Amino acid sequence: MANPLTLLMPVVPNTAVTTLVTLIAKNQASIDAALTSIGTVHFARFLILDTSVANLQPTSTANNNLVLAVITEYDGDFDAYISDFVKQLGDVFNALLFYVVGAEPLIRVQDHLSEFQAFIKANDYSQMPGAPSLYGAYPYTVQTILADCGSDAATGAAS
Amino acid sequence: MDKPSIDYGDVQGTILRGYRVNLARHFILQITDAAEAKALVGSMVNGSPGVPQITTAARWTSKPDYFLNIGFTSAGLGELGVTPAQLKSFDPGFQRGATDPKTASTVFDVGESAPENWIGGLSDGNAVHVVLSLWVTEAEATLEQVTSVLRNLFKSAMKELSAHDAHALSDNRVHFNYRDNIAQPTIAGAPPRKHSIPDDQEVVATGEFLLGYQNEIGGQYSVQPAELSKNSSYSAFRILEQDVQGFEAFLTTYGKQAGIDPEMLAAKVCGRWRNGNPLELMPDKAGAPLPLSELNNFQYVSTDATKDDTLGLKCPIGSHIRRNNPRNEAVTGGGTSTNHRIVRRAMPYGPADDAKVPDDTPRGLIGHFINGSITNQFEFLMSQWVNTDTFLMSAKGTNCQGNAVRNISGEDVFLGVNAPSSSSFTLSACVNGSVKNTNIAGFRRLITTRGGAYCFLPSISGLKYLAIPAPVGS
């Protein structure tokens, strides 16, 4: 069954929400391509949360008390594949970590692989002791689903 | 690909050069006197008369009678004064060590292969500090003479926990009777192999095997202190006992079950015939041994339908060589054939098996598996490709209906845990235009880990740094 990643990272004060939104949008295509290439991620999304607001939804002018979240469901061992993620998305991670509290020593992640791995573990809500479990409707991997739907590795698209 | 200029004289030889030798002896040592150990290490790199010197990767003008290289465990580096804070900068797997429970579960050293069963003092990882490896070109007399000198030198500094011998079998064979030592990664900037065995794969970044150079992810592996970093590497030292009679019985029993000749099954589980010819180039019969120029020159995936083997119809996707080096096959992680590679420096130990006179004499393979990151290379291979069957990307073939994802099961027949309740190997054939898989199941483990140690292989300048006496009062 898939595993959850719930990465919650405090954002450096006075970072505008629009800065993060723009950065993510600018890199979304390459992020999607990398996730398709890596082949173990079922779903992934970014959230930007405003901890000063009751429902955590930031306004377009928010620039403080922000948290950047990365939420995914993935197959297999995340730690084992960290070098593959960094190979494909290292520069995107560096760009985002620039705005994350305490992440400066990790940049460039390509040179700080094990520290980056430790940072993710420390900030992954799903690895917190007693964290709630993930419900999965099916036990299949991304690749067996694609195979059974008639897709191939080149595009991930159904034939 | 950048081809960096490497100071070969600063690199331990075995990292970049394969020694073609007949004999080897690996000493497992515990430091008993740190000051004496530092002095000994220094004497092995400063040309001290009468002291065997650590072999570098510099080109030799005439082949030496012997080669000597040295590795230290995390505990060993600690004995020589590397601080706990500095050790935290080393590869995470190396820090844990080979006997750590997380390591053992990661690489599947479980059951009979578990570290508590290891021989030669290797079961206590904290007590193992040094792996000193001696390779001898030809003569037993040289092996014994150099051993005698070394034992005299290290008796005041280190306790010998055990020594393990290896020797070449004829025709580069290993104990399951395959010709070995064919494929190694081509490393950017490394000296060319003496016997060129060209392959169709990309050159691998230097940093995958040497610290301080760019690696495949666009960074560098490094350690603190900086003096230990550039030109160093890591190895997983392994003693792997092979059940030769069990393997021959496996071939007979399961060849019959699968309806194929035992030698064909031997080829299918390996990916090469026992004479070294790859199934990709010789799918139907072994044939005469191919010349070196052709032996390794193949890929698994091709747009040419006559060559494409995406589905593993010629070379099973779960075969040993294909699992350990998927080449251009699509695997999860998105990597190419330059990712997660290792350099193999291992030789047979124990006498050749005689089927007519079966015995219980231990025999197998012993040596170093070298990489710039134990975690991302050796441990990745063992945990993701050897011991699982879920690392394939969905991929259709060009010459039969089917998908690669479905054409693999179980674990590597050679290296996997292979509990009889779950072991499985898939043979794929194209029948009436669609893949038909035959699974053989229920076989047991054929290779058991009898010992291991994660080693740091310092550069020559790193060894000189380690040799510096500790400050008085420290």
Image (cartoon, helix red, strand yellow):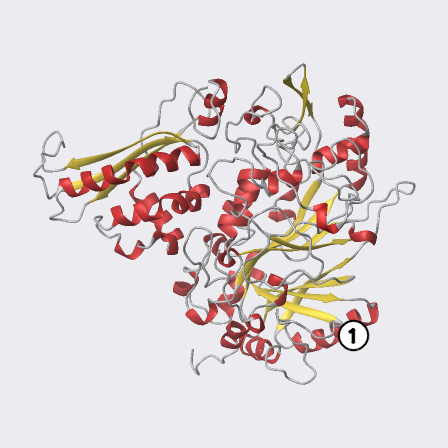
Identify the residue at image location x=62%, y=39%: B299
Please tell me which residue lies in front, B450 or B366. Answer: B366
Extreme residue toward the bottom, this view:
B49
Chain to which mark 1 belongs: B
The amino acid pointed to by label 1 is Gln
Q: Could you tell me residue B240's position as x and y percent?
A: 69, 48
SS at mark 1? helix
Quadrant location of the C terminus of chain B in the rendered image? bottom left
Is A158 situated left or right of B463 in this image?
left
Figure check: B125 above or below A28: below
Figure check: B263 above or below A115: above
Query: Can residue B107 be seen by looking at this rendering?
Result: no
Residue B304 lies in what quarter of the image?
Answer: top right
Query: Can residue A90 be seen by looking at this rendering?
Result: yes
Residue under label 1, please give it. B145
Extreme residue toward the left, this view:
A61
Please tell me which residue lies in front, A21 or B453. Answer: A21
Mark 1 packing: few (<14 Cα in 10 Å), some, or many (20+)? Answer: few
Figure check: B139 above or below A130: below
Identify the residue at image location x=48%, y=66%: B78
Number of numbered discs: 1
Q: Could you tell me residue B103's position as x and y percent?
A: 52, 47
Figure check: B135 above or below B356: below
Q: Could you tell me residue B408's position as x and y percent?
A: 60, 28
Identify the residue at image location x=73%, y=63%: B25
Q: Could you tell me residue A52's position as x and y percent?
A: 9, 37
Is B160 situated left or right of B377 in this image?
right
Identify the residue at image location x=80%, y=23%: B256
Residue A92 lies in what quarter of the image?
Answer: top left
